[in-house]
Image (cartoon, rainbow, N blue to C red):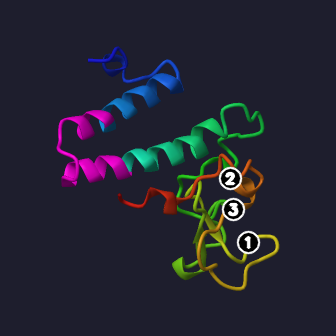
Amino acid sequence: PPPSLPSRRYGDYISFARDVRRIWQNCKVYNGHGTAVWHTADYMSKMFERLFAAWVMEFKDDKTALWSEAWARPWEPTCRISAGKCKAPDHKMVLCDHCDANFNIDCLKPPLKAIPKGIWHCPRCRKMDANRLQSASDEAIC
């Protein structure tokens, strides 16, 4: 097994990403193209790359990204602006198509009148280079 398994830790994020990519690659190599396992591995590998870019690569050099700040935890299911204090109902929450972070449409500045149709990116992701910005719609099953 990889050296990271006995210690239950990775020395760096690159080693972790390499092992996850190896899993998806093995699923695709050892299962025929077009099978359910192959399609699932293809979909999950695209999702992993998008979220790895949004949650790890974009935060790795950001010294202002403190765990105590709600926006620095995009994987949590509550509003990233209010850290869930707004207690927004589901029909008022919008999900960023790049980082998967949740936002209450009333907490955004300026607030949104309704959930946008189509692709929407949060304020943090909108500041990114458009060439690096991926969306969940890019993960369509082949």
Q: Position of residue 76 (x, y in %)?
A: 53, 55
Q: Report crowding for label 2: few under 14, some 14 to 19, many 20 or more residues within 10 A (C-alpha).
A: many
Amino acid type assigned to the residue bearing label 3 in the image:
Cys
Left or right relative to 72: residue 127:
right
Question: Sequence-wise, which precedes: disc 2 or disc 3?
Answer: 2
- Within-10-Å neighbours for mark 1: few <14, some 14–19, many 20+: some
Q: Which residues are magenta?
A: 25-43
Residue under the point 81% across and 70% down = 109
Q: First in sequence: mark 1 or mark 2?
A: 2
| Residue 11, percent from left and from top | 49, 18
Q: CA distance from mark 1 to mark 2?
A: 13 Å
Residue at 57% x, 63% y is 78
User: What's the residue type where badge 2 is placed?
Assistant: Trp
In three-dimensional space, the C-alpha distance between marks 2 and 3, rounded to whole angstroms, equals 10 Å
Figure quadrant of the C terminus? bottom left
User: Does residue 31 belong to the magenta stretch?
Assistant: yes
Residue at image point 58% right, 62% down: 97
Q: Quadrant of the N terminus?
A: top left
Q: Amino acid at mark 1?
A: Cys
- How busy is the neighbourhood of tag 3: few (under 14 within 10 Å), some, or many (20 plus)? some
Q: Main secondary structure of the magenta part?
A: helix
Magenta stretch: includes residue 119: no
Quadrant housing residue 113: bottom right
SS label for mark 3: loop
Seen in the picture, residue 77 relative to 59 is either above or below; the reply is below
Residue at the spot of label 1: 107
